[in-house]
Image: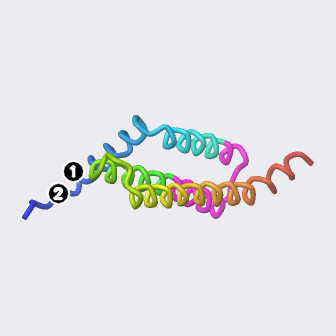
């Protein structure tokens, strides 16, 4: 049986995973860049605590789904570098999950930002 990983070592591995995703995955870079710009814009607009919670949850949701997608793709590629129909299906379904999370984040963004922008322009 493998020895249990220490609490701090778990954080180290998690940050290594984020660093690896940022370094190796173009889509993770794109999502992260959009997230940073969105957070800066929310600061400028003076979001309420509730709006911040919704925004942070939505951003986290997209990034987590992207990380899971990357993990699944890499695992499937490790198991079988050839394109197997079931591996393709799994990758396509996970990519659809990323797309759904991104579309949902746009809807949440519109709901949060549009009223503030309208009142700002009045």
* Position of residue 2 in the picture relative to residue 111 (left or right): left
Dot 2 alpha-carbon crowd within 10 angstroms: few under 14, some 14 to 19, many 20 or more: few
Question: Element type at marker 2?
Answer: loop
**Residue underneath mark 1:** 9
**Label 1 Cα neighbours within 10 Å, binned few <14 / some 14-19 / many ≥20:** few
Is 117 or 76 nearer to us in this picture?
A: 76
Q: Does the magenta segment cover residue 110? A: no
- At horizontal 56% and vertical 39% (from top left) the residue drawn is 33
Write down the region rendered in magenta.
Answer: 41-62
Furthest-right residue in this view: 122
Residue found at the very far top of the displayed protein: 23
Choose between 88 and 102: the one closer to the eye: 88
Q: How many numbered callouts?
A: 2
Asked which secondary structure carries label 1, the reply is helix
From the viewer's side, name the closer residue of 81 and 2. 81
Q: Quadrant of residue 22?
A: top left
Q: Is residue 49 magenta?
A: yes
Question: What residue appears at the point 34 percent right and 46 percent down from the top-left corner?
Answer: 17
Which residue does the numbered mark 2 point to in the structure image?
A: 5
């Amino acid at each position: 049986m493998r020895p249990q990983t220490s609490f701090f070592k778990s954080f180290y591995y998690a940050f290594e995973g984020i660093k690896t995703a940022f370094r190796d995955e173009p889509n993770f870079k794109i999502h992260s860049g959009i997230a940073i710009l969105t957070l800066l814009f929310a600061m400028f607009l003076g979001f309420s605590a509730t709006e911040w919670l919704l925004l942070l949850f939505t951003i986290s949701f997209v990034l987590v789904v992207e990380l899971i997608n990357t993990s699944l793709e890499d695992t499937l590629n490790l198991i079988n570098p050839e394109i197997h129909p079931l591996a393709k299906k799994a990758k396509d379904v996970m990519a659809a999950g990323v797309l759904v999370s991104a579309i949902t984040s746009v809807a949440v963004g519109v709901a949060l930002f549009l009223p503030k922008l309208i009142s700002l322009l009045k």
